[in-house]
């Protein structure tokens, strides 16, 4: 929670296990083979200090700067969002997931990064997994796995539509 | 600034959790007519990411019963039961675990145990703590704990977790009992014991 990781080495795995209301935000430059993953917990920092990736408004610029440092080119970046579920179905104040998703979308728009695929909402937890040189996937508790983007170098470019 | 806790404060919180979970164990034992063991609770104050890992394997599927608190202390009591434990509990009550009735039964167990736990905490501290309607969810432990902590810790950077375990003797049934107070609430718990941090 609130952590981020970046890699440019094929075969490396970036994983955020058990995303409930949190968002796993991936920024990818497929041409450069660079990917970053941030575990966003809350929508806004409200000026509070904390781990950079914890709040959507800080996480997007932070992750952007880290992937660019690792060799990504900003205009080629694509974003994938995973998580933002509503784990507890009663109580309006508990829907942090939807607010997180909205805040990440807003911050990506501000940064000028397009969203390539999204696997958000619902009421089940997910695990976000980026395997560099292979694929980005979202996996629900108990198994069901959805591939969201192929990262293989054979040029196949396929993305799954966001499903709710 | 999130308060951090010294050893004496964590000891005091651990003792509160110990007595409270003992009370909950008694009520579980009465409900099922079985012996219940309790282990020494853990009290830890950790950065969010570490706090989730400290509660268990984040990928393991568990059933969680969350009881938001009402009264003088804000926070959430969270009971976590592994799949085999949920089966055991439901079996003892004569209901199917993977059913609506089973889920409701687990919610009710959570409600009763949570109420016993909170009543003990209340009587020790003189603070009112009442459980509101339980939410039951079966999912990855990490998803459940992280989502609850996002709510209770909010903009703080450390999570205070009081973690007790109840075990039904001779059965594969461990119930993890977590008290997750909101950012400032732990100080309120410590104040009646004379251990609150002086106002900065």
Image (tube, rainbow, N blue to C red):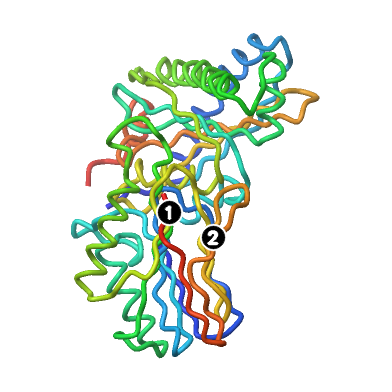
**Residue at position x 52%, y 22% from top?**
B107
Q: Which residue is mark 2?
A: A146
Disc 2 and disc 1: Cα gap in Å? 10 Å
On what subunit does the disc labeled 2 rest? A
At which x and y percent is residue A66? Answer: 37, 80
Q: Is the residue at mark 2 from the same chain as the one at mark 1?
A: yes
**Residue at position x 27%, y 67% from top?**
A58
At which x and y percent is residue A91? Answer: 32, 31
Q: In the image shown, does B32 or B123 lie closer to the viewer?
A: B32
**Rendered view: B74 above or below B131:** below
Residue A100 in sight = yes
Compare marks 2 and 1 and give the one earlier in the sequence: 2
Q: In the image shown, does B168 or A21 lie closer to the viewer?
A: A21
**Residue at position x 36%, y 30% from top?**
A90
Q: Secondary structure at mark 1?
A: loop
Q: In the image shown, does B115 or B187 lie closer to the viewer?
A: B115
**Rendered view: A137 above or below A133:** above
**Rendered view: B81 above or below A32:** above
Q: Residue furthest right?
A: B170
Q: How many marks?
A: 2
Q: Which residue is mark 1?
A: A163
At which x and y percent is residue B191? Answer: 33, 30
- The crowd level at tag 1 (other Cα within 10 Å; few <14, some 14-19, many 20+) is few
**Rendered view: B122 above or below B75:** above
**Residue at position x 76%, y 23% from top?**
B169
Residue B5 in sight = no
- The crowd level at tag 2 (other Cα within 10 Å; few <14, some 14-19, many 20+) is some
On what subunit does the disc labeled 1 rest? A
């Amino acid at each position: 929670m609130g952590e981020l990781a970046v890699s440019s080495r094929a075969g490396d795995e970036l994983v955020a296990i058990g995303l409930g209301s949190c968002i796993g935000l991936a920024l990818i430059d497929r041409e450069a083979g660079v990917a970053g993953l941030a575990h966003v917990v809350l929508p806004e920092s409200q000026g509070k200090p904390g781990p950079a990736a914890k709040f959507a408004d800080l996480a997007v610029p932070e992750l952007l700067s880290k992937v660019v440092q690792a060799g990504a080119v900003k205009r080629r970046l694509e974003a994938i969002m995973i998580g933002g579920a509503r784990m507890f179905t009663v109580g309006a104040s508990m829907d942090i997931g939807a607010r997180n998703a909205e805040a990440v979308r807003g911050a990506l728009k501000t940064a000028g990064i397009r969203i390539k695929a999204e696997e958000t909402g619902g009421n089940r937890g997910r695990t976000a997994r980026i395997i560099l040189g292979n694929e980005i996937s979202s996996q629900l508790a108990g198994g069901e796995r959805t591939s969201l983007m192929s990262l293989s170098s054979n040029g196949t470019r396929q993305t799954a539509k966001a499903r709710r | 600034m999130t308060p951090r806790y010294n050893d004496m404060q964590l000891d005091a919180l651990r003792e509160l959790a110990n007595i409270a979970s003992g009370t909950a164990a008694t009520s579980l034992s009465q409900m099922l007519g079985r012996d219940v063991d309790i282990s020494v609770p853990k009290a830890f104050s950790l950065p969010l990411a570490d706090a989730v890992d400290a509660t268990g394997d984040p990928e393991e599927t568990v059933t969680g019963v969350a009881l938001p608190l009402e009264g003088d202390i804000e926070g959430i009591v969270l009971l976590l039961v592994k799949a085999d434990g949920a089966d055991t509990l439901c079996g003892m009550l004569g209901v199917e675990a993977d059913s609506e009735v089973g889920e409701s039964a687990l919610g009710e167990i959570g409600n009763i145990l949570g109420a016993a736990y909170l009543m003990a905490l209340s009587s020790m501290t003189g603070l009112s703590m009442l459980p509101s309607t339980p939410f039951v969810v079966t999912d990855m432990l990490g998803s459940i704990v992280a989502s609850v902590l996002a709510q209770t810790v909010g903009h703080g950077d450390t999570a205070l977790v009081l973690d007790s375990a109840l075990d039904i003797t001779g059965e594969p049934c461990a119930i993890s009992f977590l008290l997750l107070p909101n950012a400032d609430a732990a100080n309120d718990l410590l104040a009646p014991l004379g251990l609150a941090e002086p106002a900065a």
